[in-house]
Structures are given as structure tokens and as C-alpha cells.
Image (cartoon, helix red, strand yellow):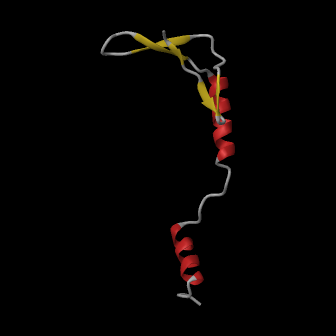
Amino acid sequence: MATHIRNFINGQYVDANAESAFDVIDPATEAVYASSPVSGAEDVDAAYAAAAAAFCSPSPPPPRRFARRRRRRHGFLP
């Protein structure tokens, strides 16, 4: 029996909005072991929005600024 693969978006498995799917075939036995959805633009947009929200924290400082702050913190710079 083939397993139905679901999209993993925002920490949970969700069904794709697409109605079509393709079979995932084991090359050794040529048996169908899973069915994967053909995710559309809505699914991609939802995954992108979830990823963007997860990584909304500011970027780390550039290496020079980070090194200067670290040296200052440890007493190497005035």
C-alpha cells in the first residue's frame, strides 16, 4: 500500500491544495511506495510565509563589528 506524503508547513503536516499527485517509485523493485502531491503556488506561498516568520530575527552583526564588540567586552579595547 502506498503512503500518502503531506506537506510540512509551520511545524505541522498539511494536505496540499492540489488535486493531482505523482507516484514515488522504488527503483530496485519498481513498486510504488508513496504518493506525493503536486504542490501549487498556494502551498509554496504558505511555506514561504511560515519560513519568513520563523526567521524574522535580525541578522547577526558583520564579523568586524562582532569582533570589536567581543574585544571590548573582554577588555582588549578601551
**Residue lying at the far left of the rendered structure:** 28
For the point 48% across and 9% down, the residue is 1
Left or right: where 31 falls relative to 17: left
Q: Nearer the viewer, residue 13 or 63?
A: 13
For the point 63% across and 24% down, the residue is 41
Q: Nearer the viewer, residue 23 or 59?
A: 23
Question: In which image quadrant can residue 10 be found?
Answer: top right
Left or right: where 64 falls relative to 41: left
For the point 68% across and 50% down, the residue is 56
Question: In which image quadrant can residue 70 be found?
Answer: bottom right
* Percent coordinates x, y for residue 78 in the rendering: 59, 90
Vertical side of 33 occupied by 11: above or below: below
Q: Nearer the viewer, residue 35 or 2?
A: 2
Query: What is the tally of numbered marks visible in this picture?
Result: 0
Left or right: where 77 falls relative to 42: left
Question: In which image quadrant can residue 74 be found?
Answer: bottom right
Vertical side of 22 occupied by 45: above or below: below
* Percent coordinates x, y for residue 58 in the rendering: 66, 57
Left or right: where 29 falls relative to 64: left
* Percent coordinates x, y for residue 2 in the rendering: 49, 11
